[in-house]
Image (spheres, rainbow, N blue to C red):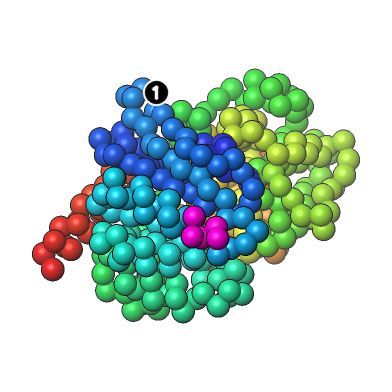
């Protein structure tokens, strides 16, 4: 939902370092922004136990070379006093290449985090960085992946033999939990007595959002009490259905997203059956399930594996009729999935164990 690690205190790269600090580790982070943002030092505190993470933010600027030099200089100065046991490098293919190179200069261990299928990103191809990225992933002291499918690809296609593990995204259970549907609808200005389906997230064509819109048109042609609610950034070319039973809430703040999900009768998760989709991780679906909201999801990637025993909850991508059938089934006889959903604390404990494993194995060499 177009969130920023520091501005919004949001996401994998915010939650996992903070949970590691809760476990008693000293954690510092450095961010390189490709857009103009406030620079400086920021302290992200965890109020309940006094844990915190020190973040340092720099902008790349219009000229890449000077920006990268400042970035390197900042990390070098921090590392001199901090002396990290591990550099956990995240964000994109460039950061992985840079982090592995930097770890050799600092004589420490680099663990690369692949929170998405970077190989399929346009920037990886346009910059000609893929061969360097592949080499960096292969040579990193450790690799963390957000899905088993991606971990398998890294092991097989990159010929990686070193420690590799899956660290799933977690869910903030203080935010994503069941709430009163009527109260949530009242807070968001949604109708009280209608059947509302919807989605919150990127409303992009490469996320197959057109299938949701066409599927909704089929549903409302049969039942005018079915309404559509949407929220999130969108492309100008996306044609959102119009009418009194369509509710466009724009871009929600992070604390409104749980209200939105709890306000729905059925939450819809769309994705194309593409290379990105195959390796995708169902973060939004986990948040939906944590709210105990019935789900209709595209049978793509990890989501296809999760819903293998619940075909009534899935639909074929790029098939509005299939989506409409799944939504209708969930409206008529809702399935509330009983799946184990990791919290960020769960994932951080697994990440801690992996860090220690890598350090032990490196010490033996």
Q: Position of residue 109 (x, y in %)?
A: 27, 60
Is residue 141 visible in this depiction of the protein? yes
**Residue 149 within the segment the image draws in magenta:** no
Q: What stretch is highlighted in magenta?
A: 66-70
Most foreground residue, 91 or 182: 91
Q: Where is residue 328 in the image (x, y as percent from the top left)?
A: 68, 46
Q: Quadrant of residue 62?
A: bottom right
**Residue 292 as seen in the image, left or right of residue 111:** right
**Picture residue at 51% right of the left edge, 60% below the top:** 68
Q: How many marks?
A: 1
Most foreground residue, 113 or 336: 113
Q: In this view, does 324 lie above or below 276?
A: above
Q: In which quarter of the image is residue 276?
A: bottom right
Quadrant where the C terminus sits is bottom left
Residue placed under numbered mark 1 in the picture = 47
Most foreground residue, 355 or 212: 355
Q: Position of residue 186 (x, y in %)?
A: 71, 21
Quadrant where the N terminus sits is top right
Task: Name the magenta segment's main secondary structure.
Answer: helix
Answer few, some or many: residues within 10 Å of disc 1's Cα (few below 14, many 20 plus, some between 14 and 19).
few
């Amino acid at each position: 939902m177009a969130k920023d690690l520091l501005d919004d205190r949001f996401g994998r790269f915010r939650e996992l370092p903070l949970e590691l600090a809760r476990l008693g580790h000293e954690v510092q982070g450095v961010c390189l922004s490709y857009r103009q943002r406030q620079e400086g030092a920021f302290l992200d505190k965890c109020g309940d136990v006094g844990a915190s993470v020190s973040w340092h933010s720099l902008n790349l600027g219009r000229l890449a070379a000077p920006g990268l030099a400042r970035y390197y200089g900042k990390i070098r100065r921090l590392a001199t006093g901090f002396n990290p046991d591990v550099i956990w490098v995240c964000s994109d293919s460039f950061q992985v290449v840079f982090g592995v190179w930097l770890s050799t200069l600092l004589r420490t261990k680099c663990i690369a985090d692949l929170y998405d299928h970077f190989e399929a990103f346009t920037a990886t191809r346009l910059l000609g960085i893929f061969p360097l990225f592949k080499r960096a992933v292969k040579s990193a002291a450790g690799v963390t992946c957000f899905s088993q499918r991606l971990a398998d690809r890294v092991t097989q296609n990159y010929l990686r033999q070193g420690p590799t593990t899956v660290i799933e995204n977690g869910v903030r259970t203080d935010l994503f939990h069941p709430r009163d549907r009527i109260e949530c609808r009242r807070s968001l200005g949604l109708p009280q007595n209608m059947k509302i389906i919807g989605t919150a997230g990127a409303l992009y064509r490469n996320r197959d959002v057109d299938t949701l819109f066409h599927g909704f048109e089929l549903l409302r042609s049969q039942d005018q009490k079915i309404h559509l609610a949407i929220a999130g950034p969108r492309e100008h070319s996306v044609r959102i259905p119009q009418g009194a039973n369509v509710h466009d809430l724009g871009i929600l703040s992070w604390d409104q997203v749980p209200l939105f999900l709890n306000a729905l009768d059925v939450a819809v998760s769309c994705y194309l059956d593409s290379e990105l989709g195959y390796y995708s991780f169902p973060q939004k679906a986990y948040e939906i399930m944590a709210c105990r909201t019935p789900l209709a999801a595209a049978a793509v990637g990890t989501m296809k594996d999760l819903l293998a025993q619940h075909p009534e909850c899935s639909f074929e991508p790029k098939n509005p009729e299939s989506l409409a059938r799944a939504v209708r089934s969930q409206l008529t006889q809702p399935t509330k999935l009983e799946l184990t959903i990791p919290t960020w604390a769960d994932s951080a404990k697994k990440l801690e164990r992996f860090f220690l494993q890598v350090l032990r194995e490196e010490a033996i060499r």
